[in-house]
Image (cartoon, rainbow, N blue to C red):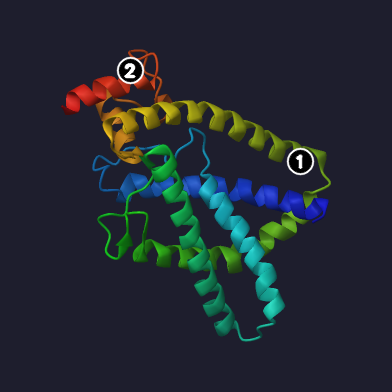
Amino acid sequence: MNKTEILIILFLFFLGSLLGWIIEVIFNKFNTPINPEHKWINPGFLRGPYLPIYGFGVIILYCISYFEKSLNIDNIIISIIVIFIISTVLMTILELIGGFFFIKVMNIRIWDYSNEPYNYKGIICLKFSLLWGIASLVYYFLINPYIVNAVALYVNNIEFSFIVGMFYGFILIDLYETMDIATKLRTFAKDKELIITYEKLKMDFYNAHEYSAKALFRNPEYKDISEYLKQFNKNKE
């Protein structure tokens, strides 16, 4: 793998994470049952405007493009069907691995499909697997070729490399700070022998303290998230 390919992959992860965040923000505002007041909510596990699972998804699609080229499929209909099946399966596996990791390791449920038909442990479901497949087709055929070509033109531009590097600096700092909160959540969840639904917790936090999206986990009433969780538990009891 050469420098150009590495920079393309790094940028695609950045792009996918950012676009995924935008999609989830809009979806959570208008279509999430736990958000009947249609508030703006920062989705996902990290604080910044990025969702890494989408970044990994875009990288998977980029890798699929190499696989599809090796098949030499001339019929566009067959090509679409093949890409749809492969991307649907791989995206579902990615979602399954990510969901299981947070539940088994962190005692946190980042998303919950329990109310969706044909779901598996609330982590994956038929509806969203098909939606991932459709979204993958849109990205793969309409967006990816232009993005890859554009990035290839800028890989030797120092400003471009700086922007990509700055993104990864922010996300590493964000990850470090968020893991501190996640550790406290995990300790709390293990003590109470429960799985915390992260989106529901954030909504309770918003509603209880009238937080805006920019002030999540920063209410001066609590020194840290562990104090909030103690009070949260008392209120539930």
The tag earlier along the polypeptide, 1 or 2, is 1
Q: Quadrant of the C terminus?
A: top left
Q: Circle 1 is placed at which residue position?
A: 161
The residue wearing badge 2 is 227
Image-quadrant location for residue 39: top left
Relative horizontal placement of residue 236, taking residue 127 as reference (left or right): left
- Badge 2 marks a residue whose secondary structure is helix
Residue that protrudes farthest toward the left in the picture: 237
Q: Left of 196 or right of it: where is 148?
A: right
Element type where label 1 sits in the image: helix
Q: Where 80 sits versus 18, above or below? A: below
Other residues around mark 1 within 10 Å, as few (<14) / some (14–19) / many (≥20): some
Label of residue 141 in the image: none
Residue drawn at x 59%, y 35% as measured from the top left:
171
Name which residue lies at 28% across and 35% down.
193
Q: Residue at x 46, y 46 (%)?
A: 101
Q: Quadrant of residue 102?
A: top left
